[in-house]
Amino acid sequence: MSTASHPAAEAASPTTGNQPPVLLGTSAFGQNERAFPVYDAYWEGGGRAFDTAWLYGYDYGPGCCERAFGAWAASRGVEKEVWVLAKGAHTPECLPDRIEPQLRESFERMGRENAALYMLHRDNPSVPVGEFVTVLAELVERGVIGGYGMSNWPLVRVQDAVSYAHVHDLVPPTGVSNQFSLIDMVRPIYPGTLSAKDPRWRSWLAENRMCLYPWASQGRGAHALADPEELRTGQLAKSWHSPANLERLRRAAWLAEHKGVSSTGLALAWTLSQPFPVVPLIGPRQPQEVRDSLASAALRLTEAERDWLETGKGTMPPV
């Protein structure tokens, strides 16, 4: 049985109806006055799916981001319409017995009783994968969550989770949220963060039709730089600077200009044009940035365009 063949896979999909194939991240919004204009712009553009986490905003006030999101949904009367990807059990509390208590706390903060999809925010390799799967599958069966997955997990552990679920006739995971974008994450942005961009990951995602929910899917603002050379020394340099990434930024800027979209929008189109299911997490900070991303969400690139942007090989796409 593939991951997509279980009923939970359908329950955990946010891409039905007119919903753009993206999730809006909430990690930057712990204050209502900053969150509400961005969420309103996303909602007005058709967006209904939001990425939340127990840990978001922890350094500024535990739970502030979940509370701001919940306050917005309540004030707009859309609590039952939003599609929520919730995450929890982050290191050092990545333990099976911390999953439900943290999830319940997240629900209380957001003013809701369930989530369409729940993901472990990190892995704990000292815990047998079956212990995580057993707890998560039970939450699905009880209707607390619509499906589950893993964020920042290595491929072998995700494969083990899928195998364990199938062998024990449990609901399998239906999604993975690792970093993935046109430019490579050269060094982890945060401790314990992982990419799903290597060939083994990409092949497995395509073969198994596992949905990828990539964070930093547009290169975390790198494509918005006025000059790609700023990537060498700016705030993004540590995680993103490499000669290959500089060339990717240049190619993306060129193709974006000829397609009439922003370079950041083209980066989103690249992420969405993969040969496996992808629902990118986007992180705009201003309403105009939301509208820019949504304007490019329907754009799909050809295989030749996609590969040329990444590798520079082949013929420059005709325009």
Image (spheres, grey):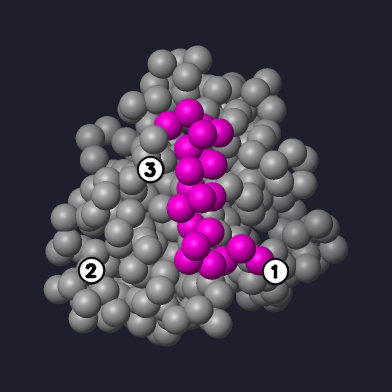
Kindly check if marks 2 and 3 are in contact, taking CB atoms under 8 A apart as contact.
no
Residue type at the position of mark 1: Pro
Image location (x, y in percent) of residue 262 = 55, 43
| Image coordinates for residue 196, horizontal then vertical, percent | 48, 72
Where disc 1 sits, the SS reads loop
Position of 288 relative to 186 (above/below):
above
Would you name the residue on which mark 2 appears?
170
**First to last magenta residue range:** 92-112
- Identity of the amino acid at label 2? Leu
**Residue 111 among magenta residues:** yes
Category of crowding for the residue at label 1, using alpha-carbon neighbours closer than 10 angstroms: few (below 14), some (14–19), many (at least 20)? few
* Observer-nearest of 169 and 38: 169
Determine which residue is flagged by label 3. 115
User: Image height check: is 159 above or below 50?
Assistant: below
Q: Residue 110 carries which label?
A: none
Q: Can residue 89 be seen in this view?
A: yes
Q: Mark on residue 191? A: 1
- Whether 229 is drawn above or below 67: the answer is below
Residue at 53%, 22% (x, y): give it: 72
- Observer-nearest of 187 and 7: 7
Q: Quick one: label 3 or label 1, which is nearer the N terminus?
A: 3
Dominant secondary structure of the residues highlighted in magenta in the image: helix
Residue 202 pos. (x, y %): 38, 76
Q: Name the quadrant of the N terminus.
A: bottom left
Give the residue type at disc 3.
Ala
Q: Based on the displayed image, in which of its 4 quarters is residue 113 positioned?
A: top left
Tell us which disc is closer to us: 3 or 1. 3
How far apart are the alpha carbons under marks 1 and 2? 31 Å
Q: Which of marks 1 and 2 is in front?
A: 2
Is the residue under label 1 in contact with that under label 3 (CB below 8 Å)?
no
